[in-house]
Image: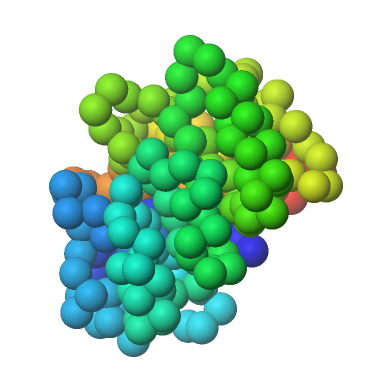
Amino acid sequence: MFRIKICGITNPTDALAVSQAGADAIGLNFYPASPRFIDRDKVRQILEVLPLKIVKTGVFVNAVPKEICQTFDELPLDLIQLHGDEPPDFIAQLGGRPVMKAFRLGSDGLKPIVAYLEQCKKLSSGPKLVLIDAQVKGVYGGTGETANWSICAQYPRQENLPALVLAGGLKPTNVTEAIQQVRPWAVDTASGVESSPGLKDHTALAAFVNAAREAFKRTK
C-alpha cells in the first residue's frame, strides 16, 4: 500500500513537502493527547493540497469504532492506523475498512503480536499491515525511541500475515541500516524528521525519503 510514510503531519506546507520529497503516505493524528493532534478542519486543508496517490492515514488511539468510521468516510481517508490497546475483535467493528495495527515492542518480543494475529485469523478479520514501534511506558508513539531491530527482523514473512511497517526512532542517519537489517515492507517516521513536535524539517524529510528509497532498491 505504501513504502515510506511520514506521520504527524499538522499543516499543508509540511504535507506538500512530503509529496515533493517522494514519500507515498502521511499520518494524520486524531489522538487528542498527542502534540501532533489535528482536528478535521485542519485535515481537510491538508487533503486539499495532496495528490490522490498519497495514502492518507488516520491515526487513532483507543477511539470509538463509530467515530473512527465516520472520520474515515467523511474526510475521506485511505487507511486506519490503530495505535492504542485495541483488541483483535475491534477491527471487525470497522466494517472492512483497511487497518494498520501498531504494536509497541516490549520485553515479550514478537509473541504478543503473533498471538494477536492468530486471534484475528480466528475472527476472520485482521489488519492489512502491522506496524512495530518502540515501547515507552505511558506513551503511545512518536517518542523517537528506536525499536529493537534484531527482534523486528524475526517478524515472520508468511503470505497469510500482514506486511511489516517499521517505526520507532527512524531518521535520515539510520533508516538505511534499519531497512538493511530488518527488511520491512515499509518505514514510518514522525519525530525523526521534525524541528519540533508537529513541525517537519523539510531538509531532513527529503534526506529520509531519499535514504529509504535507495535502501529499498538495494534490499530485495
Residue 47: percent from left, percent from top: 35, 80
Q: Is residue 197 above or below residue 12?
A: above
Q: Quadrant of the N terminus?
A: bottom right
Residue 121 appears in view? yes
Identified at 37% across, 57% down, the residue is 59
Residue 25 appears in view? no
Q: Is residue 17 left or right of residue 130?
A: left
Residue 11: percent from left, percent from top: 23, 69
Residue 129: percent from left, percent from top: 61, 51
Q: Nearer the viewer, residue 14 or 8?
A: 8
Q: Is residue 117 left or right of residue 104?
A: right
Identified at 60% across, 53% down, the residue is 127
Residue 218: percent from left, percent from top: 76, 44
* Quarter of the view holding residue 180: top right
Q: Is residue 94 above or below residue 109?
A: below
Q: Nearer the viewer, residue 125 or 109?
A: 125
Q: Quadrant of the C terminus?
A: top right
Identified at 64% across, 39% down, the residue is 119
Q: Is residue 108 above or below residue 68?
A: above
